[in-house]
Amino acid sequence: MSHYDAIIVGSGPGGAMAADALVRRGGKVLMLERGGWVRRDPTSHAPESVAMLSEHYSALTPYAADTDTGVRQNGAFHCVGGQSVFYGAVALRYRERDFLSDPRDPSGAEWPVGYREFEPCYTRAERLLHVSGDTGADPTEPFRSGRYSQASPPLSDGGSALHAAARRRGLRPFRPPLAIARAGSTRPACVGCGACNGFACAVGAKGDASVVVNALLGRGLELRTGAAVVRILSEGSRVTGVQYQDVATGELHRVFGDSIVLAAGALATPHLILGSGLQFQNPGGAVIGRYLTRHCNAVICGYFAKRPPFARLSYKEFAVQDFYFGHPAYPELGGIGSIQQEALPAAMVERELPRPLRPFGRAMLSHLAGLIVMTEDEPRWTNRVALDRRNVSVLGLPGLRVHHRYAPRDLARRRVLITEAKKILAAAGAAASVARAIDTFSHALGTVRMGLDPLTSALDGAGRFRGFHNLYVVDGSALPTSAAVNPSLTIAANGLRVADGIGMSGTTGHRDVVLERRVAFHARA
């Protein structure tokens, strides 16, 4: 029955960074996570441990996804650190222009804060995650107040081959910044095992959110795993706590706090809000679950007749942003997006092959090099998550239905990037290449978006849920637009930014700061 300064639901990048900001100010914080800790040992790199094949991808509360490719049942990642445990560690910032309104966007999405307000939090997040990179190498890099704490390591033979091929195409390749600890860091250093993307790091060098959570335990953060939150409790214009179910025993528990911070993800957070009926007290309640974005991505595999030097790339070493703000041949499309190197885990390659060809999957892998293209998809009213009360999960939660279709401009931009990626692979010596669209929700964003207009956004500029003065959202659902870069660092930075403005009892003078921000925001709105 302890009372907390804040209760955080979810342990991904947003929740972990919010916890860090609150604990560093002396807060007593409870974090609730449905999953458990991911084991870190040599089995972390086993084929059955990759991403969606791992035990941490759960269908405990499945959702029905209706996308361009059809209808299917999906699960979700449940573990300390969330999906970041399995990410490729790319830590790119949104560009300054990404915070500006796009006149081509019909949804009215707008950021209530700009890049300058995010920049200090980007810097803090990079330090907490031990991000290494080459300052100034990215031709579209936004303003930075400081250099990366560590430089990128030397390129491998495979990375050098991709860079040389892109330069022959007249492009400006660079090594993307990575949240991977190097030699000389205070964390275990990368050992170059070749299993970053899609796997948990066996030695703990990768800067996923679990690293941040682990460092806070015993310092003001209490973590309860196996705790599936099923309801947000409220009285009037304030939330008082949450109800959660112990996944192992089925027992229900209630915990109470001064503030509730939702960080369960862009699908689970609106699921919880809608299931708790909080949308009816929010002037922007109609948009909750709407404007789902997830990037319009594809993987391009190049086949090399002779075994290329790409088979043992340990992490992503290659990125191209030359088309980020547009392509000279397609001015009508606006910003196009980015191209990055993509690791191809053997287990996932075999899974995608027709069954008769799967025995040849590993042999083929040594002749493949992968690139991923990433375009920003438009926030659309019809792209949404919604409750399905006809199907109730084992936790007693109503089911969730997800509907998503890409706009014609999204698909056109992806086609442009696929063409450019194939040209790079051909310049590197690929005999042939094939593209496959990505149909996951790994970059899901926007379903409880922040904004200036209370009628078209569920959150204000402080990340506060409208209608309740002590409920906040810090996961990807808060981001009104997706940009065309990996979102994890922006989610992390936003978690720090929002938590900095959460008042706590016993924090001298902080409530005055919150009031000043509130007045300034409404004056601007």
Image: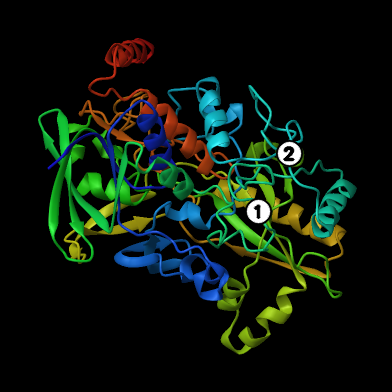
Q: Nearer the viewer, residue 370 or 378?
A: 370
Three-letter residue code for mark 2: Ala
Would you identify the image quadrant in which residue 434 lies? bottom right
Residue under the image location 63 percent in, 48 percent down: 413
The spot of residue 361 in percent (x, y) is 66, 80
Q: Residues within 10 Å of mark 2 (few under 14, many from 20)?
A: some
N-term mark: 2 or 1: 2
Q: Secondary structure at mark 1?
A: loop
* Mark in front: 2 vs 1: 1
Eyeballing the image, is 366 above or below 356? Answer: above
Three-letter residue code for mark 1: Cys
Q: Residues within 10 Å of mark 1 (few under 14, many from 20)?
A: many
The spot of residue 230 in percent (x, y) is 20, 52
**Circle 1 sits on which residue?**
190
Q: Is residue 79 left or right of residue 325?
A: left
Q: Nearer the viewer, residue 511 or 522?
A: 511
Q: Nearer the viewer, residue 341 or 445?
A: 341
Instruction: Name, please, the residue furthest toward the left.
Output: 235
Residue under the image location 68 percent in, 42 percent down: 184
Q: Secondary structure at mark 2?
A: loop
Label placed on residue 151? 2
Instruction: Name, please, the residue furthest toward the bottom.
Output: 356
Mark 2 touches mark 1? (CB < 8 Å): no
Q: Can you see residue 54?
A: yes
Eyeballing the image, is 33 above or below 136? Answer: below
The spot of residue 494 in percent (x, y) is 45, 32
